[in-house]
Image: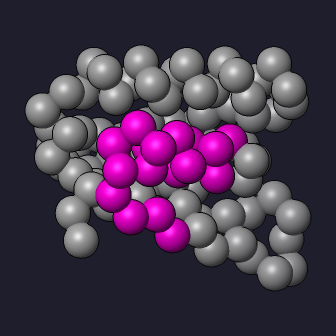
Amino acid sequence: MVYLSGKILAEKPDEVRRLIRHEEQIELAKNHLSQILDIDHRGRKMTITTINQWLAIHLGKQFKKTFKGHLKIDRDPFSKEEAVVQWSQEP
């Protein structure tokens, strides 16, 4: 699961969606389970549901690289497939 928040989501939604889909294609070439199930976009907030943690982590890192901001990654110690990724443009 990826949680994004920031003004860039409201100001440039098409650019953000292109970035997300592009990164999905990169990860999909490596692992057929790296897919996005759902994108819920509401103004300055977006939630992305992924099948595996690797795509979620990759998306978070790419948002930090592209738009700066703050990134937090929490992995479930009991599951190899779950991670919660939070990226925020604002402090």
Residue 23 shows up from this direction: yes
Taking the spot 82% from the left edge, 34% from the top edge, the residue there is 33
| Placement of 41 over or under 15, stated as above or below | below
Residue 49 shows up from this direction: no
In the rendered view, does 89 fall on the left or right side of 31? left
Farthest bottom residue in view: 77
* Front-most of residues 36 and 12: 12
In the rendered view, does 13 fall on the left or right side of 69? left
Taking the spot 35% from the left edge, 50% from the top edge, the residue there is 68
The x and y percentages for residue 39 are: 43, 37
Taking the spot 20% from the left edge, 39% from the top edge, the residue there is 8
The x and y percentages for residue 28 are: 76, 24
In the rendered view, does 77 fall on the left or right side of 66? right
Q: Quadrant of the C terminus?
A: bottom left
The x and y percentages for residue 16 are: 34, 29
The x and y percentages for residue 12 are: 19, 27
- Which SS type dominates the magenta stretch? helix
Image mark count: 0
Q: Quadrant of the N terminus?
A: bottom right
Q: Is residue 67 magenta?
A: yes
* Front-most of residues 18 and 66: 66
**Quarter location, residue 67:** top left
Q: Which residues are magenta?
A: 55-72
Q: Is residue 16 magenta?
A: no
Taking the spot 81% from the left edge, 58% from the top edge, the residue there is 81
In the rendered view, does 21 fall on the left or right side of 32? left
**Quarter location, residue 35:** top right
